[in-house]
């Protein structure tokens, strides 16, 4: 048997700590409030998208299931005919870029439908350039083409800057 040295004692202690960490814990792990909200939201997303949307928003960002939360939340907003403030709350949680563009385009379309064109134009400026043509289509669809889209200083969908729109 080897004599005990400080190095050996540290190795034994480290092995004991590692072994203790590997032992399965038989007691169930308690879910966080966020996880409970996400469980509820995913469970009702199909049957009650408006309520699920609220639960996804209330769960807030976190370390687990974030991309799934944002993707399903966007679908719930679309299916529940969400109000502009609900879309803004979604966008404030900083969804991944593809989802953010899709959400902002939905918000622009909703604002145009409500004749809140100036607000819709402001939202356009937050889109990446590759989404401007779709935003332009939405904006022109809600405007009288000859009075607002055809004239003025709007350079059209091919412009590489977020141009001002003459209303």
Image (cartoon, helix red, strand yellow):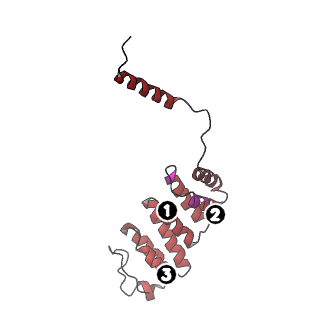
Q: What is the magenta range?
A: 55-66
- Label 3 element class: helix
- Rate crowding at label 2 as few (under 14), some (14 to 19) or many (20 or more) other CA atoms within 10 Å: many
Residue behind mark 1: 93
Q: Is residue 22 above or below residue 33?
A: above
As drawn, the label of residue 117 is 3
- Rate crowding at label 3 as few (under 14), some (14 to 19) or many (20 or more) other CA atoms within 10 Å: many
- Rate crowding at label 1 as few (under 14), some (14 to 19) or many (20 or more) other CA atoms within 10 Å: few
| Residue 32 image position (x, y, % from top left) | 58, 49
* Residue reaching furthest to the top: 1
Asked if marks 1 and 3 touch (Cβ < 8 Å), the reply is no
The one nearer the camera, 34 or 159, is 34
User: Earlier along the polypeptide chain: callout 2 or callout 3?
Assistant: 2
User: Earlier along the polypeptide chain: callout 1 or callout 2?
Assistant: 2
Q: What residue appears at the point 48 percent right and 68 percent down from the top-left corner?
A: 104
| In this picture, residue 81 sits left or right of residue 105 | right
Q: Determine which quarter of the picture holds residue 125.
A: bottom left
Position of the C terminus, as image quadrant, is: bottom left
Residue behind mark 2: 50
| Residue 96 image position (x, y, % from top left) | 44, 58
The one nearer the camera, 38 or 155, is 38
Q: Is residue 115 above or below residue 101?
A: below
User: In front of the other: label 2 or label 3?
Assistant: 2
Q: CA distance from mark 2 to mark 3?
A: 25 Å
Asked if marks 2 and 3 touch (Cβ < 8 Å), the reply is no
Q: CA distance from mark 1 to mark 2?
A: 17 Å
- Label 2 element class: helix
User: Earlier along the polypeptide chain: callout 1 or callout 3?
Assistant: 1
Q: CA distance from mark 1 to mark 3?
A: 24 Å
């Amino acid at each position: 048997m080897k004599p005990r040295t400080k190095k050996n004692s540290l190795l034994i202690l480290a092995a004991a700590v590692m072994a203790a960490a590997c032992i399965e814990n038989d007691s169930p792990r308690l879910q966080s409030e966020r996880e409970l909200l996400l469980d509820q939201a995913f469970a009702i997303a199909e049957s009650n998208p408006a309520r699920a949307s609220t639960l996804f928003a209330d769960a807030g960002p976190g370390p687990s299931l974030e991309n799934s939360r944002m993707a399903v939340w966007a679908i719930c907003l679309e299916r529940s005919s969400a109000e502009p403030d609900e879309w803004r709350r979604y966008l404030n949680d900083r969804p991944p870029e593809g989802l953010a563009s899709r959400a902002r385009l939905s918000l622009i379309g909703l604002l145009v439908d409500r004749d809140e064109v100036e607000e819709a134009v402001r939202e356009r400026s937050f889109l990446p350039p590759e989404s401007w043509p779709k935003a332009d289509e939405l904006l022109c669809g809600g405007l009288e083409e000859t009075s607002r889209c055809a004239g003025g200083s709007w350079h059209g969908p091919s412009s590489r800057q977020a141009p001002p729109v003459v209303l």
